[in-house]
Amino acid sequence: MMRLKYVLTGVMLCIGLLAHGHPLHLTFSNLDFKTSSGKWVLTIKVFSDDFASALVKSGESADMMSMRQDNAEAEKILKNWLMNRMMIWFDSKPVPIDTWKFDGIKVHDDASWLTYSFTAPLPVSEIKIKNTLLLDLYSDQKNLFVFAMGRFQSAYEFKNKNQETTIKLNK
């Protein structure tokens, strides 16, 4: 009887852990050129618990609810985290993260949306993207990325074995 009690306790604990976490390790990113403003907008959607774990692993601890557009400390933490995890080149020229303007973070339920904007000359021939968001945390991590510039739209998947891509604009 005592042994059954331990087995049932273990099963209940495992069920509780499975119900609490999510088995899907996925981010969504969009890079859009807004013709009306002439700006690029980068939006990153990440599960909030994964995002918090990534910040802690990188030596930061931040309450995502306190990260607002006008919070300089939050902006610094996010730029430090993103610096080598999301990189963009237009025609072989890097778009420095220091030119990205932090437009804010929205946390809703289990997801966090980070938004940045920047100005840069329109690329002529290619865009290179490196996306390693959360790849250091999860071996099954996938990062979906959508690029839109006028009528040109394309989607890409990044994972441990495929961390960067070059988008050819003159096909």
Image (tube, helix red, strand yellow):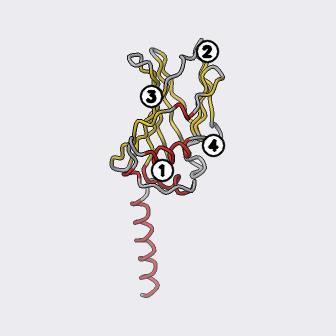
Q: Amino acid at mark 4?
A: Asn
Amino acid type shown at disc 3: Val
The alpha-carbon separation of the residues under discs 3 and 4 comes to: 25 Å
In percent of width and height, residue 130 lies at: 61, 34
Q: Where is residue 51 shown, x and y percent of the image?
A: 48, 50
Residue 168: give x, y in percent of width and height. Answer: 60, 18
- Indicate which label's residue lies in the foreground, 3 or 4: 3
Above or below, comparing residue 52 to residue 45 in the picture: below
Q: Amino acid at mark 2?
A: Ser
In this figure, which residue is indicated by the disc labeled 4? 160
In the rendering, which numbered label is found on residue 125?
2
Is 12 or 27 nearer to us in this picture? 27
Q: Give coordinates of residue 158: x percent, y percent.
A: 58, 37
Distance CA(mark 4)–CA(mark 1): 17 Å
Mark 1 lies on a secondary structure that is: helix
Q: Residue at x 43, y 61 (%)?
A: 18
